[in-house]
Image: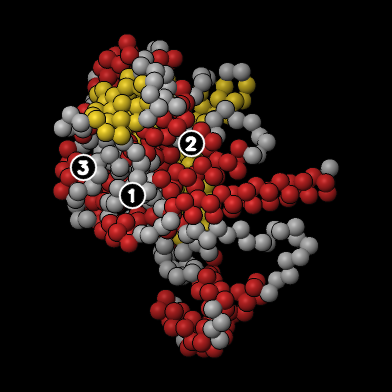
């Protein structure tokens, strides 16, 4: 419960202070074991503090406290749901970064898995960060495990060897401290299995005193190094073969299994096979033939294939039967029973784009190390993503507005969502321009003052 947001909405909707305080007393009584006098004192203090912020004099601050609201809400536009809306917002974030004058080899403008900077002529540093799955708040060990695994994957697929993990965790005011410890243990399980140490982090409350409840949010980051060019998506070539390792899922599949009552699936996700596969490929004797790697997570193969297509302007041709054969059978069975789009959900496979003459050697290398792998398609000169269906029909494969609905609530939201996509895009574009202008104005102001 966001107390600050509740009070601000009450003030803007012209509710009286007395009415707002009465409701706050009820809310606080639900969450806090306080006597009546203490409850009301806390309510009044909350109210007065928030009211002060609504009366601030914002003049003379060069717009620092000005709102930059688009009028488009996160859930309304599918942000975080790995579909068309999410990809678009990430492209706008990348636009702001692209208008920032700092050099890098790979940054979010490439919409790749991780970012890369060049230290000297032969040395590269790769970094990545992943947030915990929002529905794993009540399962902190799994949240930590799968987030650590995800961020290591993002470093590995850029052709780097991971060397360190970092952690950030925010737990709401009423959260049990044990959640922090369980979350950290989940990260450290991956750390121990992969030999990559957890070296630093940050621990805070969600919203400080202003957010009640026990919601857990956080992220895990990874740092890697390499002495060769990153295996970014943009490096794919025409006629390259597309390989895929077996997908057993991660945070998304775990969430699917919990909220649809398939607990037996959870154990299938508990492995570090992806990171093991990446390590083998990073040590391959002919690294130059591995042109690109990515994890199949962002809206499933629908989303990742489209992102490769957009970053290269090359075509992707896929075979659906080959893909389904490389999904863990227990995971596959659950997805089929729940009628979840197998191509639109994160299955945590490794996609490898290689020169044709090395495809068999790489498959043999991985399978000799107990990692199932096979050919699922090829890169073409056409600008588009096509898939051969089990029926033999060839269809265009495109990302949907949101990733495949894999929990009951996601299915309902899909049904009731009435977003005007084009209007939302215009609003987000304008908000992006305002953000860039604000950044430029503040940077110039600071430079003028101190330089």
Q: CA distance from mark 2 to mark 1?
A: 27 Å
The residue singled out by tag 2 in the image is: 111
The residue singled out by tag 3 in the image is: 331
- Residue at image coords 30%, 48%: 404
Q: Nearer the viewer, mark 3 or mark 2?
A: 2
Contact check, label 2 and label 1, Cβ < 8 Å = no
236 w.r.t. 185: above or below: above
Specify the quadrant that holds the N terminus: bottom left
Q: Is residue 103 left or right of residue 242?
A: right
Marker count (numbered): 3
- Residue at image coords 51%, 42%: 91
For label 1, the crowd category at 10 Å Cα-Cα, with few meaning under 14, some 14 to 19 and many 20 or more, is many
Q: Quadrant of residue 332?
A: top left
23 w.r.t. 418: above or below: below
Q: Nearer the viewer, mark 3 or mark 1?
A: 3
Q: Is residue 11 left or right of residue 262?
A: right
The residue singled out by tag 1 in the image is: 142
């Amino acid at each position: 419960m966001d107390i600050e947001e509740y009070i601000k909405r009450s003030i803007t909707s012209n509710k009286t202070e007395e009415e707002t305080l009465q409701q706050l007393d009820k809310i606080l009584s639900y969450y806090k074991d306080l006597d009546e006098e203490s409850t009301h004192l806390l309510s009044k203090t909350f109210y007065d503090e928030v009211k002060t912020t609504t009366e601030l004099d914002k003049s003379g601050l060069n717009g620092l406290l000005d709102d930059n609201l688009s009028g488009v809400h996160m859930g309304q536009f599918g942000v975080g749901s790995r579909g068309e809306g999410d990809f678009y917002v990430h492209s706008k974030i990348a636009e702001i970064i692209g208008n920032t004058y700092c050099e890098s080899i790979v940054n979010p403008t490439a919409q790749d898995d991780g970012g890369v900077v060049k230290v000297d002529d032969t040395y590269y540093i790769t970094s990545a960060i992943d947030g915990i799955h929002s529905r794993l708040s009540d399962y902190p060990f799994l949240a930590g495990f799968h987030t650590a695994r995800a961020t290591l994957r993002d470093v590995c697929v850029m052709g780097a060897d991971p060397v360190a993990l970092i952690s950030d965790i925010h737990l709401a005011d009423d959260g049990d401290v044990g959640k922090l410890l369980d979350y950290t243990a989940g990260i450290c399980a991956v750390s121990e299995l992969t030999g990559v140490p957890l070296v630093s982090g940050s621990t805070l409350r969600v919203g400080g005193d202003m957010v009640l409840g026990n919601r857990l949010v956080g992220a895990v980051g990874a740092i890697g190094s390499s002495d060769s060019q990153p295996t970014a998506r943009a490096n794919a070539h025409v006629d390259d073969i597309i390989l895929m390792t077996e997908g057993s899922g991660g945070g998304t599949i775990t969430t699917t299994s919990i909220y649809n009552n398939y607990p037996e699936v959870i154990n299938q996700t508990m492995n570090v096979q992806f990171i093991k596969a990446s390590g083998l490929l990073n040590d391959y004797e002919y690294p130059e033939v591995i042109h690109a790697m990515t994890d199949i997570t962002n809206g499933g193969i629908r989303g990742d294939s489209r992102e490769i297509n957009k970053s290269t302007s090359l075509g992707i041709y896929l075979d659906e039967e080959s893909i389904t054969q490389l999904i863990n059978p227990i995971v596959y069975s659950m997805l089929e029973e729940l009628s979840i789009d197998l191509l639109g959900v994160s299955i945590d496979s490794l996609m490898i784009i290689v020169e044709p003459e090395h495809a068999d050697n790489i498959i043999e290398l991985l399978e000799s190390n107990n990692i199932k792998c096979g050919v699922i398609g090829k890169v073409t000169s056409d600008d588009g993503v096509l898939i051969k269906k089990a029926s033999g029909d060839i269809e265009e494969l495109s990302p949907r507005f949101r990733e495949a609905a894999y929990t009951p609530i996601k299915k309902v939201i899909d049904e009731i969502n009435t977003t005007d996509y084009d209007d939302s895009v215009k609003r987000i574009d304008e908000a992006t321009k305002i953000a860039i202008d604000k950044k430029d104005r503040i940077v110039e102001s600071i430079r003028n003052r101190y330089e």
